[in-house]
Image: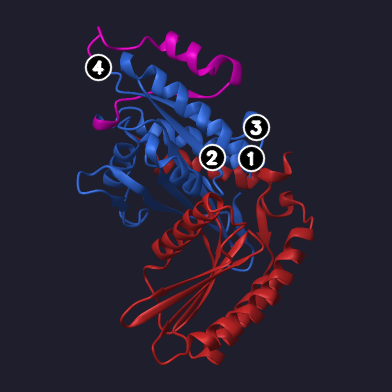
Amino acid sequence: MDPQLTSIIVPSEEIAQIEECLSRLVEDTGSDYALLLDKSGQVISSKGDGDRQDITALGALIAGVFASSREVAKLLRERDFRASFQQGVRENIFIALIEEQWILCIIFNKGTHIGLVKVLTKKATDELAAVLERVRQQHKARDEVLGSAFRTSMEDTIDLLFRD
Amino acid sequence: MALINVAAREIHCKIVYYGPGMCGKTTNLQYIHSQVPKEVKGDLLSIATETERTLFFDFLPLDLGKVRGFQTRFHLYTVPGQVLYERTRVAVLNGADGVVFVADSHKNKMQENINSLRELAQNITRQNKRFADFPIVLQYNKRDLPPEVLTPVATMDHFLGVNKMNWPRIEAIATKGVGVFETLRAISRVVISKL
């Protein structure tokens, strides 16, 4: 099995730590929302006010923006843009990269100072980088999670839903 | 690489439709979006120019529901096909679990197909993945073209290296939906087998 194709499995314990970290970040900065994304655009966890319905699309777009700015960085012979800031009239978005694998995104309004967001995001990215490291080191056999019974059921579901 | 969230019992997979400009990548997604049940699909998001050419990507989330207790989600993306957007394709390809390569069956498009597939190989390799092991399905689109401009399947197989690479290959007419779901089933199966 090619390790590059191995799935990232985030166990319950690490998810709990991620959620705690995001909640604290939202609370301490007074932000509206914090999201942790995988670089592929998938949402790992999100915390904040209310229940956003558009979170999947938001994840895909933010990861797209980040991936595209990475290509810009390469053209400028810059190693990477570790963070980016988008300023709106009401809402702002601050995005920070965690070890080339995850993306932390904070949505906040003008009541929150960008300086505070930057400082506390830095602290949060360090924490999350440690969580990511633990996730990577766990060689939890994927067969514990996804056995052959899962694959068979999955194939049946695919045939059922994706039919002409 | 797929993401498995054990606490929320969720599995996410990313599938990217790749290929030269105007080969029918967006059409594939539009057809899927028009046909799958409401409870399975999310909104189809397109970042396109005013002439409906894909500028960044199209995005279609599909929620397959619970499979053995796991909420399973497939995210389908297309890349912009035009040569100009090479770097954008690299960005969209980031973290993909599988690729559908849509080839245009028009005789004049064969060289573009070959160039695009070659570029895909480079981009996959740059992500430190082995191209030979990467989940890929080929779709020969526009099989309804008039015979005088239609490339025979055997010729496409030869130039795109299908026999050598052992890729599943499906003939399609995406505008009419022919072969679209067969392609989606094929790539889903390959991706699941490599999870």
Q: Colour of chain B?
A: blue
* Label 4 vs 2, first from the N-terminus: 2
Q: Are dots 1 and 3 on a single chain?
A: yes
Q: Are dots 2 and 1 on a single chain?
A: yes
- Which of the labelled discs sits on residue B133, or is there none? 3
Image vertical order of residue B194 relative to residue A84, above or below: above
* Label 2 vs 3, first from the N-terminus: 2
Q: Are dots 1 and 4 on a single chain?
A: yes
**Residue A16 x %, y %:** 65, 76
Look at mark 2 in the image and give the residue it sits on: B98
**Spatial separation of the CA atoms under disc 2 and disc 1:** 9 Å
Q: Residue at x 46, y 21 (%)?
A: B114
Look at mark 1 in the image and give the residue it sits on: B194
Left/right placement of residue B195 relative to residue A90 reads right
Left/right placement of residue B57 relative to residue A140 reads left
Number of the front mark, 1 or 3: 3
Image vertical order of residue B176 relative to residue A128, above or below: above
* Figure quadrant of residue A19: bottom right
Q: Is residue B94 magenta?
A: no
Q: Pick out the residue farthest to the left.
A: B51
Q: Are dots 4 and 2 on a single chain?
A: yes
